[in-house]
Amino acid sequence: MAQSSIEWTELTWNPTTGCDKISAGCKFCYAEVMSRRLKAMGVEKYQNDFKITTHEQELETPYTWKKSRMVFVNSMSDLFHKDVPIEFIQSVFRVMRENPQHVFQILTKRADLLLYYDKEGFLEWSDNIWMGISVENKTFMKRIDLLRQTNARTKFLSCEPLIGPLPNLDSTAIDWVIVRGESGRTPRPMKKEWVMEIKEQCEKSNVAFFFKQWGGTNKKKTGNLLDGEKYLEMPEIIETS
């Protein structure tokens, strides 16, 4: 568990670590770079390079948090990677269900495996488990339809980084959309018209819109103003007990 600088969450919790690249948005993977850095620092959890690794001891961590938290699950991995055993995924879901005072935000690029597990009845949802998929350009908009078919109560899209337009975005049954431009030394540019089209679609469909950053080589300088305003909307949190 670690405090997070990610604007749309509070903590990160990584019961698994490691991943591999499957689409264009993975090109400059932050988690891969950070994993190598942590390995070089001697952090035990990251000694397996960037290979998928499960961490049973992490399953106890959420029970120790005293205050309600917004938790990003697996910022350093993808819970629905094919090499994560379904039994371990079910254990993660059990922990989330048993801690209803927290909101758990899961994000995957592997929407096909997510939907397969859900349709097979392997996943048991509760209202505090938010499910998101990454959509970086129009090539991967098919992931949205797969997410829509799941039984997750709160569904969201992470357009991070947004590296192409999402024409005629259908946000039916989607609760939240996050948009971020790529940052780093050689970021791929994000056009304003791509952002505005997503924002307008969210407004039409009454979907929460969160604009994280323009990105670029100096993300602090470019900031997160869109026509002079900040858009940091969040979906409704359903109280559970």
Image (tube, rainbow, N blue to C red):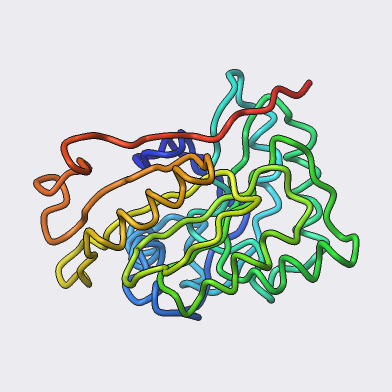
Q: Residue at x 59, y 22 (%)?
A: 68
Q: Is residue 149 above or below residue 12?
A: below
Q: Residue furthest front?
A: 204
Residue closest to the eye, 55 or 175: 175
Q: Residue furthest right?
A: 121
Count of numbered tags: 0
Residue closest to the eye, 222 or 93: 222
Horizontal and vertical percent for residue 77? Answer: 53, 62
Is 173 positioned to the left or the right of 8 in the image? right
Q: Quadrant of residue 54?
A: bottom right
Horizontal and vertical percent for residue 202? Answer: 46, 47
Horizontal and vertical percent for residue 195? Answer: 31, 56
Q: Residue at x 42, y 43 (%)?
A: 209
Q: Is residue 240 above or below residue 205?
A: above
Q: Residue at x 90, y 60 (%)?
A: 121
Q: Quadrant of residue 230?
A: top left
Is 13 positioned to the left or the right of 116 in the image? left
Q: Residue at x 15, y 68 (%)?
A: 185
Residue closest to the eye, 214 or 202: 202
Horizontal and vertical percent for residue 214? Answer: 21, 53
Q: Quadrant of residue 225?
A: top left
Q: Quadrant of the C terminus?
A: top right
Residue closest to the eye, 91 or 103: 103
